[in-house]
């Protein structure tokens, strides 16, 4: 798509040093049936305890609130499509300690409206110039296409509509 996951990964990677603990929950949308596993991952990553087990979703939500509520953390929740998933992960304004940051990626802005997030950033499609440069780096190892491929490269950029993943 538009690069939401890539951007979220980069933000997490570049900023995790500013937080005591961090967790990146990837592709949550496709793991709806694995909520207990996601809760365990959140607890394990933040608490740095590899043996944490949760028996059910309700217990996991309670444990997250109890054990992580005072910690300064960075949590990235990637590709959410249902606000209930955030509730089950105890992802709310006051879920974690002061200075914490929660980054949520979603295709559905309605999910963010339900959660009343502080700030929204809408990923933008690349300009034709940016898209041509990205394509050129991957195809030609340079920031511009070879002269004999310029028209083909422009056609590809037009066809992909500025979406980095398509390029």
Image (spheres, grey):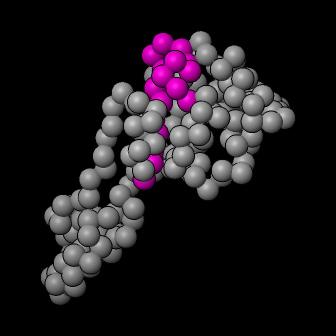
Side of 140 relative to 6 (left or right):
left
Magenta stretch encompasses residue 31:
no
Residue at (51, 37) in percent of width and height: 76
Residue at (45, 42) in percent of width and height: 111
Q: Is residue 131 above or below residue 102?
A: below
**Placement of the C terminus among the 4 image quadrants:** bottom left
Front residue of 37/130: it is 37
Q: From where the camera sits, is residue 50 visible? A: no
User: On the image, which quarter does residue 73 sit in?
Assistant: top right
The part of the chain drawn in magenta is 91-107
Q: Position of residue 145 (x, y in %)?
A: 21, 75
Magenta stretch encompasses residue 93:
yes
Side of 42 relative to 29 (left or right):
right
Q: Is residue 146 above or below residue 82?
A: below
Q: Is residue 78 above or below residue 44?
A: below
Q: Position of residue 130 (x, y in %)?
A: 21, 61
Main SS class of the magenta portion in the image:
loop
Q: Position of residue 126 (x, y in %)?
A: 24, 59
């Amino acid at each position: 798509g538009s690069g939401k996951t890539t951007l979220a990964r980069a933000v997490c990677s570049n900023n995790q040093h500013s937080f005591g603990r961090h967790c990146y929950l990837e592709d949550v949308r496709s793991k709806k049936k694995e909520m207990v596993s996601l809760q365990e991952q959140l607890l394990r990553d933040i608490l740095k305890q590899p043996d944490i087990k949760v028996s059910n979703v309700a217990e996991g939500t309670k444990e997250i609130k109890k054990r992580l509520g005072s910690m300064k953390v960075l949590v990235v929740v990637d590709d959410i499509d249902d606000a209930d998933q955030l509730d089950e992960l105890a992802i709310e304004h006051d879920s974690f300690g002061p200075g914490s940051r929660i980054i949520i990626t979603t295709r559905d802005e309605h999910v963010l409206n339900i959660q009343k997030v502080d700030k929204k950033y809408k990923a933008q499609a690349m300009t034709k110039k940016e898209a041509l440069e990205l394509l050129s780096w991957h195809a030609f190892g340079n920031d511009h296409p070879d002269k004999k491929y310029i028209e083909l490269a422009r056609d590809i950029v037009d066809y992909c509509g500025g979406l980095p993943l398509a390029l």
